[in-house]
Image (cartoon, rainbow, N blue to C red):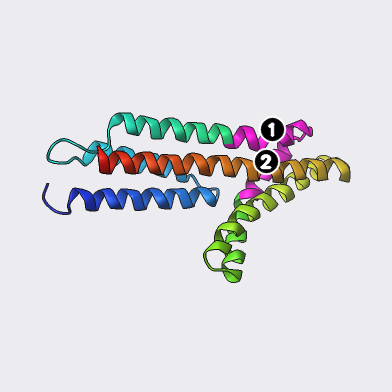
Amino acid sequence: MSGPSYYTIATLLTVGNLLGFVGTIFALPGNWLIVLLTALFALFVHTESGGGVTWLGCGAVIALAALGEVLEFAVGAAGAAKQGASRRAMALATVGAMVGSMAGSAGGSVIVPVVGTILGAIFGGAAGAFLGAIGGEYWRGSDHQKGFAVGTAAFVGRLLGTGAKLIVAASMVVIATIDAFWN
């Protein structure tokens, strides 16, 4: 292989996958960035002895990304659905989570540069889900008590769903890194 060494490119894969992990914190499709980078690495980068990310490792990353989506949706929606949330409330909770993650990360970075950004994104996303769900219920004509119950369930569901998805994303990064460096 001429040009950059295999290990340099494998390190870049790990850095790119870590950026995907960070994207997941901000309610972006970071897990799918990890899948894309890992698949491209498996397809195009190999050692002289034929090593590299295996298709088995790539398949594991793909399966985990799908599992992460299912977990995030199931955990995030379960509580709100249990409270009888409307589709409108669930849709606005999703939009609110994305907007809240971005706003929370910006606000958190002012308070504490690194940790504040991450915590702001996570809790900002949950707060955005809360406000979106309440707004959706009020728009539907629900009373305050129902709106608050659905919003609280969306808040808790968003925190738990994000936590589950982050655990999956971390597993994806570890699998791709181990497969790239020790295959």
Let me know if residue 68 is in the magenta part: no
Relative to 8, residue 182 above or below: above
Residue identified by numbered label 2: 157
The spot of residue 161 in percent (x, y) is 61, 40
Quadrant of res 76: top right
Side of 62 where 55 appears, left or right: left
Give the amino acid type for the residue marked by disc 2 in the picture.
Answer: Gly
Residue 57, given in percent of the width and then of the height, sits at 33, 33
* Residue in the picture at 38% in, 48% down: 17
Taking the image as drawn, is residue 90 in sight?
yes
Is 72 rendered above or below residue 16? Answer: above
* Label 2–label 1 contact, CB within 8 A: yes
Check the image and name the residue furthest to the front: 182
Q: Position of residue 162 (x, y in %)?
A: 58, 44
Q: Is residue 85 magenta?
A: yes
User: Mostly what secondary structure, the magenta segment?
Assistant: helix
Measured as percent of width and height from the top left, residue 180 is found at 28, 42
* Label 1 element class: helix
Corner quadrant of residue 139? top right
Q: Is residue 25 above or below residue 69?
A: below
- In the rendered image, which residue does mark 1 sit on? 78
For the C terminus, which image quadrant?
top left
Q: Which residues are magenta?
A: 72-97
Disc 2/disc 1 C-alpha distance (Å): 7 Å
Q: Identify the residue at image location x=39%, y=42%.
A: 174
Residue 136 is at least partly visible in this image = no
